[in-house]
Image (cartoon, rainbow, N blue to C red):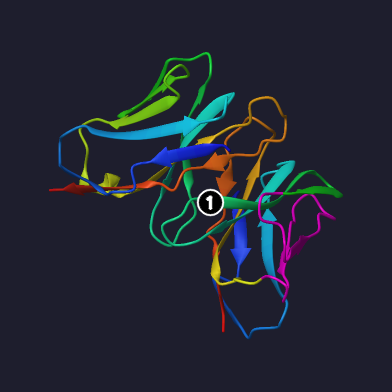
Amino acid sequence: DGGITQSPKYLFRKEGQNVTLSCEQNLNHDAMYWYRQDPGQGLRLIYYSQIVNDFQKGDIAEGYSVSREKKESFPLTVTSAQKNPTAFYLCASSSGTHYEQYFGPGTRLTVT
Amino acid sequence: SQKIEQNSEALNIQEGKTATLTCNYTNYSPAYLQWYRQDPGRGPVFLLLIRENEKEKRKERLKVTFDTTLKQSLFHITASQPADSATYLCALGPGSSNTGKLIFGQGTTLQVKP
């Protein structure tokens, strides 16, 4: 059963702690993306990766870090430097540029 | 700066009618435009992609138009059903770069009443 998985679905952390969100895909896609969605707003791109061992900053990369050591995996770390980390985080993948993106179910992060 | 706008007000229609959602953009020349459906608390699901050289695209009860002169896309759902109730997002693909980066609108919520 192909698709993208994100875990956990809900995540709670105390302010000042780093937290890593998991994203795994078995679609054999080269490109992967991380978005953040806040209530009533569109998706904003945090980081993206077009190929293994390479990634680029999106529009709101400050306070976040990623790695792409394997084609299937693109974890996102929300660091304590991120001022407003509470949000709904979505991971996506695509078979290449100019193609549709497949999204995971999302992780809702709450930081208090 | 680039701007993409979707009607922020929810669209309420009666079952069986055609729903029409708009997506307007400025300061951008996308190579393509995509439409996604998002249900509450879930990830978006891809619906349709239309390229800059295409005027119209259809898929079952869905139709998308793309007018690069008006800088506008219209998304139609014919014979709408309560199950079509969701938020619909439009996304612009990059014009000149080859990054695959999409710019998303904030979405329009559609409510189809039985």
Q: What residue do we see at 57% from left, 45% from top?
A: A102
- Image quadrant in which the C terminus of chain A is located: bottom right
Q: Which residue is drawn at 72% across and 42% down?
A: A31
Q: Position of residue A21 (x, y in %)?
A: 67, 68
Please indicate whether residue B60 sits to the left or right of residue A2 in the image: left
**Residue B60 against residue A91 in the figure, above or below:** above
Q: Is residue A112 visible?
A: yes
The segment highlighted magenta reads A58-82
Residue A76 shown in magenta: yes
Q: In this view, does B11 lie above or below B30?
A: below
Q: Which of A81 and A95 is in front in this view?
A: A81
Q: Residue furthest front?
A: B1
Q: In this view, does A4 lie to the left or right of B56?
A: right
Q: Is residue A108 in view? A: no
- Dominant secondary structure of the residues highlighted in magenta in the image: loop
Closer to the camera, B11 or B50? B11
Q: Residue at x 15, y 36 (%)?
A: B16
| Left-right relation of B33 to A17 | left
Q: In which image quadrant can residue B55 be found? A: top left
| Amino acid type of the residue that numbered disc 1 sits on in the rendered structure | Leu
